[in-house]
Image: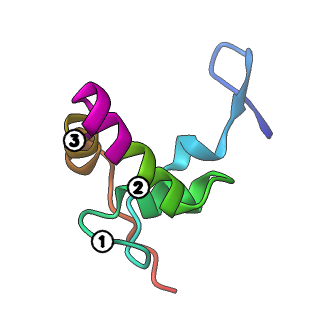
């Protein structure tokens, strides 16, 4: 983790998930699970499975996916 010093002088921990973007390379629908797979040690297929299971058992997976699709920025880096 990278330590950053803010305006107040307090050190914060910059986690890789704080730079989370939607994936342009590993996407089936919106790139949410691919982006999570790129920014965490968990593979994208596991995120897809989790979203489906949360949708089936709790009804929240689809809502969370759609909200992330809307509010998480797209990765504009050219590889």
Q: Is residue 21 highlighted in magenta?
A: no
Q: Secondary structure at mark 1?
A: loop
User: Residue at coordinates 19% horizontally, 47% vertically from top-left?
Assistant: 70
Is any part of residue 76 visible from this angle? yes
User: Is the residue under label 2 in contact with that under label 1 (CB below 8 Å)?
Assistant: yes
Query: Which mark, residue 62?
Result: 3
Residue 3, position as x, y percentages in the image: 79, 34
Residue 10 or 13: which is nearer the viewer? 13
Instruction: Estimate the spatial distance between the alpha carbons at disc 1 and disc 2, rounded to whole Å.
Output: 10 Å
- Residue at the spot of label 2: 48
Magenta-highlighted residues:
52-61
Question: Disc 1 or 2, which lies upstream in sequence?
Answer: 1
Which of pointers 3 and 2 lies earlier in the amino acid sequence?
2
Q: Is residue 34 above or below residue 5?
A: below
Q: Mark 2 Cα within 10 Å, few/some/many (few <14, many 20+)? A: some
Decide: is 44 above or below 2: below
Q: Earlier in the sequence, mark 3 or mark 1?
A: 1
Q: Residue 59, how many percent across, how many down?
A: 22, 29
Q: Which residue is at a point 20% across and 45% down the rendered structure image?
A: 66
Residue 24, percent across and down? 37, 75
Few, some or many C-alpha atoms within 10 Å of disc 1 (few <14, some 14-19, many ≥20)? Answer: few
Query: Which of the 4 quarters of the picture holds residue 76?
Result: bottom left
Tell me what residue is drawn at x 55 percent, y 59 percent: 37
Label 2's element?
Answer: helix
Residue plotted at (57% across, 43% down): 17
Quarter holding residue 5? top right
Looking at this rendering, what residue extends furthest in the front direction?
57
Kindly state the secondary structure of the residue where label 3 is placed. helix
Residue holding disc 1? 28
């Amino acid at each position: 983790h990278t330590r950053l010093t803010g305006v107040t002088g307090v050190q914060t921990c910059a986690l890789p998930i704080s730079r989370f973007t939607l994936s342009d390379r590993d996407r089936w629908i919106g790139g949410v699970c691919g982006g999570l797979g790129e920014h965490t040690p968990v593979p994208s297929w596991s995120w897809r499975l989790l979203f489906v299971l949360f949708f089936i058992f709790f009804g929240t997976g689809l809502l969370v996916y759609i909200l992330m699709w809307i509010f998480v920025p797209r990765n504009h880096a050219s590889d």
